[in-house]
């Protein structure tokens, strides 16, 4: 993966920050509550009152987009942190323990990596209740992603820990009688920071896209809570190309994804995953 | 000796693949068996059925109550080609899959082929010519393709009445392009390339023989990953575009908690991805398949390559 020029990275980060800020302040910025229906004005075009028009239930599209952005942009990093925690535990313990535990963990991460992730999400999400409360459905969707998306991270963490534990400073520390716990927290973990940050930055957009795909298939966040997944679902009613405002969530999602790609902090070695 | 090592590696891989399959199938069956609503059959609520019929349906469903018994029975029957009866469609699962496989295979084939051709052609051109405009344009297209979920892309293609396999191609293309380009550029900076240039080997020969050819083993490893990516994109594509393939069947089975269909699909998908990835890695491992040095390369450069 190539390094993005530093200026472009900073601009991308600043724009991402702005979008985050707007999403965080949805309560103040949104013209109406996300679930409020204006029944006399369903499917209306953009106007001074509704900047992005209203949906088929008469809800303000701009408000739903702002709240939906908040759900997706706040919970995807949370899911990413969860998967990274599991990856750290699985990959780190596999590299340090070695033997049969290493083989089991490697096989497990390979299994999670080789199965198409959407098929995995679909299967696991479908066995969980479909008629849950909106907030519960958010937690289920993003927790599931965090619990299932650790394979790639574990592989990277394992490789890094194996490299670091055999490096001279770690050998010296072990030679001077450093306990395994101290070796892990004091010496290995700080050296993994860069790798973990890169993994975090890679998995956040993957989880945002994952939620969007699940939402589109009707297995994501439950209505009336907006998220990018169920906002994009509106496109299934086949809007005309001149109804450009309907495509606002697509434009925003695409922009955020590109900004994430541009602002990726650390370059990676060539890897097929 | 190398042959013996290759055979033992193959045996190890096959054992690992079989174990992975068994575990994946069992996990799938367990998840679905304990999912809420599994024991509810809507036919039992139908007032047109008599009590005796409702009881018979309940009895039939309770056969699957113990997941171990179900999985054991399922595997025994599967050995004989019987994957059970779909709960949603009431037809044999094997028949369901067979009738839908054509659509999926065709779509996968077209999408993977186009994605790989596009990715390799652009990566090759970008690495060979080094034109910044070509590189940045291809990078922009791949960034755009990676920034939309396959389902949204399928919707946009559907609205624009475009070919559906383009969605799969766009899911595969960015990974192939970026990986292949980085790989070609990495290979292009190796000292042996300078040595070949110094000996007057033509640029095109250097690129094909010294850059592209040694890059195929790691590219083969990507083949397994790209299959998995394409299959992941297949589900939303078939659902959104209403194509009667395996992806749509998986979605409907997931919504309908159709245990026999889901377990069979989990086994099938795991088998294909494990075999494709394993085969790609095995073929790409120089220990198993020795790398050929181009015959037209001068003797001195062949020695450089061997180093």
Image (tube, coloured by chain):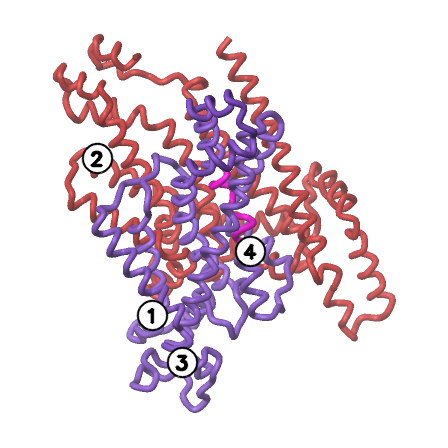
Chain colours: A purple, B red
Find residue B192 and report its image quarter: top left
Give me the C-alpha separation between circle 2 and circle 3: 48 Å
Q: Which residue is mark 2?
A: B127
Residue mark closest to the camera, 4 vs 1: 4
Distance from label 4 to label 1 (Cα)?
A: 27 Å
Q: CA distance from mark 4 to mark 2?
A: 41 Å
Region of the chain picked out in magenta, as a range: A145-155
Quarter of the image holding residue A109?
Answer: top right
Image mark for residue A248? 1
The reply to whether label 4 and label 1 mark residues of one chain is yes
Q: Are marks 2 and 1 on the same chain?
A: no
Quarter that holds the C terminus of chain A: top left
Of all residues shown, which one is farthest toward the bottom?
Answer: A40
Q: Residues within 10 Å of mark 3 (few under 14, many from 20)?
A: many
Mark 1: which secondary structure? helix
Under tag 3, what secondary structure?
loop
Direction from residue A116 to residue B71 in the image, left or right: right
First-in-chain label (4 vs 1): 4
Q: Position of residue B298 (x, y in %)?
A: 20, 11
Output the chain of dot 3. A
In the foreground, A19 or B144: A19
Q: Residue furthest front?
A: A176
Which residue lies under the disc numbered 4? Answer: A143
**Whole-number angstrom distance, CA of label 4 to CA of label 3:** 29 Å
* Pointer 3 residue: A60
On screen, B294 above or below A270? above
């Amino acid at each position: 993966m190539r390094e993005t020029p530093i200026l472009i990275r900073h601009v991308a980060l600043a724009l991402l920050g702005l979008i985050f800020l707007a999403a965080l302040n949805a309560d103040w910025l949104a013209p109406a509550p996300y679930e409020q229906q204006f029944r006399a004005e369903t499917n209306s075009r953009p106007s001074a009152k509704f900047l992005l028009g209203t949906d088929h239930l008469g809800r303000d599209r701009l408000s739903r987009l702002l709240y939906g952005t908040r759900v997706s942009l706040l919970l995807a990093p949370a899911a990413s942190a969860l998967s990274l925690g599991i990856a750290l535990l699985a990959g780190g313990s596999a590299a340090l323990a070695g033997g049969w535990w290493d083989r089991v963990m490697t096989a497990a991460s390979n299994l999670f990596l080789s199965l198409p992730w959407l098929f995995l999400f679909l299967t696991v999400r479908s066995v969980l209740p479909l008629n849950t409360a909106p907030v519960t459905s958010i937690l289920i969707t993003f927790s599931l992603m965090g619990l299932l998306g650790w394979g790639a991270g574990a592989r990277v963490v394992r490789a890094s820990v194996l490299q670091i534990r055999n490096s001279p400073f770690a050998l010296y520390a072990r030679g001077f009688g450093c306990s395994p716990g101290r070796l892990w927290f004091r010496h290995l973990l700080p050296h993994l920071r860069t790798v973990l940050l890169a993994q975090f930055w890679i998995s956040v957009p993957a989880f945002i896209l994952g939620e969007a795909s699940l939402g589109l298939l009707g297995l994501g966040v439950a209505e009336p809570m907006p998220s990018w997944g169920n906002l994009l679902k509106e496109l299934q009613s086949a809007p005309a190309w001149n109804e450009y405002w309907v495509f606002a969530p697509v434009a925003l999602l695409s922009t955020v994804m590109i900004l994430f790609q541009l602002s990726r902090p650390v370059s990676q070695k060539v890897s097929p995953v | 000796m190398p042959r013996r090592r290759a055979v033992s590696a193959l045996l190890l891989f096959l054992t690992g693949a079989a174990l992975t399959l068994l575990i994946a199938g069992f996990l799938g069956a367990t998840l679905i068996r304990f999912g809420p609503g599994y024991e509810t059959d809507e036919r039992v609520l139908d007032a047109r059925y008599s009590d005796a019929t409702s009881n018979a349906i309940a009895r039939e469903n309770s056969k699957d109550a113990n997941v171990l018994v179900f999985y054991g029975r399922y595997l025994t029957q599967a050995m004989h080609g019987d994957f059970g009866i779909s709960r949603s469609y009431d037809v044999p699962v094997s028949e369901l899959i067979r009738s839908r496989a054509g659509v999926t295979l065709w779509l996968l084939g077209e999408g993977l082929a186009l994605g790989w051709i596009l990715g390799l052609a652009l990566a090759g051109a970008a690495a060979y010519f080094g034109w910044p405009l070509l590189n940045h344009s291809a990078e922009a297209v791949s960034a755009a393709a990676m920034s939309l979920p396959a389902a949204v892309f399928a919707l946009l293609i559907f609205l624009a009445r475009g070919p559906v396999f383009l969605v799969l191609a766009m899911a595969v293309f960015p990974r192939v392009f970026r990986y292949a380009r980085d790989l070609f550029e990495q290979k292009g900076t190796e000292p042996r390339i300078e040595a070949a240039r110094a000996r007057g080997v033509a640029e095109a020969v250097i690129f094909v023989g010294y850059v592209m050819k040694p890059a195929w083993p790691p590219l083969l490893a990507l083949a397994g990953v790209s299959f998995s990516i394409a299959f992941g994109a297949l589900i939303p594509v078939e659902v959104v575009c209403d194509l009667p393939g395996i992806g749509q069947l998986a979605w409907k089975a997931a919504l309908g908690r159709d245990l026999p269909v889901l377990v069979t699909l989990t086994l099938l998908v795991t088998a294909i991805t494990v075999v494709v990835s394993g085969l790609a890695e095995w073929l790409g491992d120089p220990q198993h398949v020795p790398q050929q040095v181009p015959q037209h390369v001068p003797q001195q450069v062949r020695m450089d390559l061997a180093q």
